[in-house]
Each structure stands twice: as structure tokens, then as C-alpha cells.
Amino acid sequence: MLPSPPGCPPVIADAMRYSLAAGGKRLRPVLCLASADSVGGDRSLAMPAACALELIHTYSLIHDDLPAMDNDSLRRGRPTLHLVAGDGMAILAGDGLLTEAFALLARSPAGDDAATVARKLRVIRVVADAAGATGMVGGQAIDLACAEPDRSGRPATALDADGVRQMHARKTGALIRASAVTGAVMGGAADSTIESIDAAAAEFGLAFQIVDDILDVEGVSADLGKTPGKDAAAGKPTYPALYGLATARRMAAGCLERAEDALRTAGLADSWLMEIGRWIVHRSS
Amino acid sequence: MLPSPPGCPPVIADAMRYSLAAGGKRLRPVLCLASADSVGGDRSLAMPAACALELIHTYSLIHDDLPAMDNDSLRRGRPTLHLVAGDGMAILAGDGLLTEAFALLARSPAGDDAATVARKLRVIRVVADAAGATGMVGGQAIDLACAEPDRSGRPATALDADGVRQMHARKTGALIRASAVTGAVMGGAADSTIESIDAAAAEFGLAFQIVDDILDVEGVSADLGKTPGKDAAAGKPTYPALYGLATARRMAAGCLERAEDALRTAGLADSWLMEIGRWIVHRSS
């Protein structure tokens, strides 16, 4: 679904594919497809949204790994894009992936009926709100402002536990919620069902971050495909650092219970979506 | 139309506004509104697209000015964003503006009818294709690849005159075409009229770049609001450098004639849109 030569210059096509083809868990597209499937929808209608969410996640990793941000050298088991293509091309590859996500969401075969067109526009709203300054980009900005004072002299912000939760709700939670919600929208779910799925996905998102932090403390580079222990070493406020490992694990389990409650109200406690939630908490990489 | 606190963290809301509120010509929104107006459409229906195009143009300037790209220190008469907020926050502000553009394009008051919803989805496709790797981002990637070899050892590309034209067609031309086309789409123009406007806007885009290069050679910093003579000093292939000043001026005038021919076939030779085209060629800043 990506643009390729001759329509797209090879230098940027290659840079975009380098990071996207490196693999990763594909959690967001899987959540999107599982959500569409769980509400009885046609999974193929959710596929563009599933792919767009992975493009957006990948762009965020590319920009986040830049020297001006987290300065990371390993991602998905490969050297980060800016190390192989330069910082400038990495910035552009991220920009290209983000823009292509919306191109993909807006593509419309001639056969689209009015209901499908309206759903696509709704999905674009959900994704843009989740990925933008009120969501993921906003969370990254808070994260960055905590890491260092900016050049105008604004001091670095120290986050308390609630601030950390809110930062992660934007930085990782918003796109995970959008993944499940867009799948449900394209699957034709009723608004009440979409609300239940959104509530469950918010719990999945928090659990995902808690487990990510736990794995960052415990993990090894080969399993994670990224540099372990880096957040803790950078003094970033992780859940194990704030609450201890045992409590952090209990918190993740609590998220799972609340998610199951939310899905039960929509008759989806035994769905594929709930299975993905369990994997999020019990995964080892 | 921008997100603000408390929904949006102040640190990123401020960074986005810093660059956007610095002014500039607002050429793209003006083109969009002029196009909607010229086809007899309701200008207010084109306003979200007009604003979204300025958000995208501003994001592209922020990223283009970064040390990893053009490393510029002056833009729209102000120090560039990365100098006041840091490179990381500048990258995020650009990401936020780009994403918000699509949020804005997808917003849909409850009263939207099916035709308006379909037009909005078409506008998102046009904008995303013009701004992404096949358009603006692709042009910037070519520009960057010409400026320096990347770290994988791929040599810097030397562009001939045709390569320069194609690079600019992507880098600045695509978004200028999209500005006129989206205005016409939201204004309810027939497809044949949209095609004529697209052809004229392609000429406007080329003329804009030629005149920009001429002003870069002749201009002073205070008028341009950016560092003059920089492209020529960096050895970038400008139109005056390739053809000489007199020929470059004749080329811009030729664009204007062809644009007028294209607009005449749609009965728009005396439109506001054509007036904007004349301003593009005769402007002094």
C-alpha cells in the first residue's frame, strides 16, 4: 500500500520501507482487525486503517529515535534509520509515513457507498485526534519537556504518578485506543459497542505501557529489538520505578480485569479482541 | 482552529503557534479560497482546507529549517522554531501541525450532506498525495539527497535542468496545485473545470519557484523574512543560476500566459484566481 518509484523518488521510498519492513509486533493493526472481526464486521474493510495505524506508529518511532529526541541506535533489531540514512532523511521518512497514512485512509474505490464514505471520514478524525498534539505528539512533547529544559529557559517538568499516567495515555494510549475504535467503526459497530471497546482499549493501552516498562527493566536487547534499560538509565519515570515491580504487575492485571468488564457489557468478553488484551499483559517481548 | 490547552499540552500548543502566527504570505490558503470563489462556490466551505494547507506549509518550513536539513536561522522574520524551542520540540511541532491538518479536513458538522462528506474525503486524498512522498516530502528528499551524500555512501545526486524542474514540481508545485484544486472541489466545480484549474496552478507553482529563486538572488532579508542568497551560496541549482536572470524572468512570464490559457477554457481568465497568479509573478517579496 506504499508509494513506490517512479511515482515516488527511490531515496524516500527506500527510507520509508527500511523502518516499516523491520517488523515489530504489529500490535496496532492486529488490534484494529481483531476489533472489526469481534463486532462481526468485514475485516478487509478495516485493512487500510490497520495499515495506516502501523505507518503512524512507525513514523513516531523514527522521529522518537532521532538524536534530537531519544537518540536511540537500535529499533526492531536494526540500526535506527537516522544512523543509516542521516537525520534529515529520517525526518522526511517519518513525515512521508504519517502523510501516507491519511492518503491510505482517504482512498475510496468507486464502489464505496455513502455509509462507507462517512465511516472513512470518521476514522480519519479518530486517527488524527489520537496521533496529533492532543494525543501521541502531545505525549511525546510532555516526555521531551521532562527530559530536558528547552532553550527558552522553560524548566524541565517533573511528573508525579498521575502526570506519568496522563503522559502515557497520550503517548501510547491514544493510538492503541484509536486502533480498536477504528476497527469497530469500519466493522459497522453500534456507538454503544464502540464506547465499550474504547474503554477496554484504554485499559489495554495502560497495561501495554506498564508491561513495556517492566520488560525494559527485565528484558534483553535481542528479545525487545531495542536498547533495554535505557528509560530507567535516562531517569525517565517508569512504572516499576514509581511503584516497584510487584505492584506494577498487579496494576497491569487490574487493567485486564477492567477491560474484560467493559467488553462484557458489549457481549465481547470472549472475543479475539480480549485475547489480544491478554497477550499484551502476558507477553515476554 | 488549532487545539489548545487543556486538551493540548501547552508546550506543544505554544510551539505550533509560534511558527504559524509568524505570518507569511498565506499564499496557499488564498489560492484555495480564490479558487472556491472563482468557481462560484461558498468560500466558507473551503476555509478548513485553506487552513489545513497553511498548517502543512508551516510544518514543512519548520522541518526544512532544522539543522539536519537546511539549517536556517531566520523564517518569516523570526528566529526559526528549533532555535527557540530546541530541535526535538520543533520536530514534534511540525508533526503536530501536519496531523492537525488532517483532523481539520475530516471534521464534519452534523449537518454535512453526503455530497459534502464525499468532497471532504476527496480533498483529503488530494492534500495527502500532494504533501507526501510522491509530492512535497519526495521533493524535499531529492533536494536533501542533492545537498549531501547520505551515510550509506549513496553519492549526492547532481540534477540537470529537467531534474530541477521535477524536484520543484514536487517540493513546492504539488501543494500549490492542491491548494487551487481543493478550493475548486469544495466550491463544487465540475471535473473539467477542476482540471483546467489544476493545469493553471501547475504553472503558478513553477512561476512561484522561479520568482522565489530570483528574489533569493536579488532580495534582502527584511523583505523576504528569511536568509537571502542562501540557496545560491549552498550551490543549490536555482533558475537564475541555470538560465540567467533575464531568461528566468521570461520563463515566469511564460507560465503566466499558459495559466491564463488554461483558465480561459473554463471561463476563468478574469477570475480572482488569475489575479493571484499575476501577483505570484510580479510580487517583490
Image (tube, coloured by chain):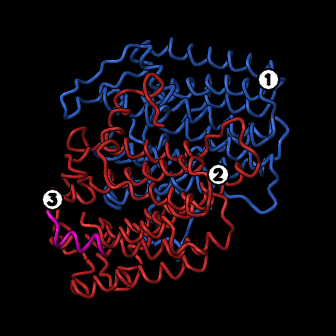
Chain colours: A blue, B red
In the image, B66: left or right of A126? left
Image coordinates of residue B53 in percent, x first then y, are 47, 53
SS class, disc 2: helix
In the picture shown, does residue A270 fall above or below A77?
above
The segment highlighted magenta reads B211-221
Do labels 1 and 2 touch, CB within 8 Å? Answer: no
Location of residue B253 by image quarter: bottom left
What residue is pinned by disc 1? A269
Measured as percent of width and height from the top left, residue A11 is found at: 42, 69
Q: Earlier in the sequence, mark 2 or mark 3?
A: 2
User: In front: mark 1 or mark 2?
Assistant: 2
Does B41 sit above or below residue A30? below
Residue beneath disc 3: B221
The chain containing the residue under callout 2 comes to B
Tag 2 residue: B120
Tag 2: residue type?
A: Lys
- The chain holding disc 1 is A
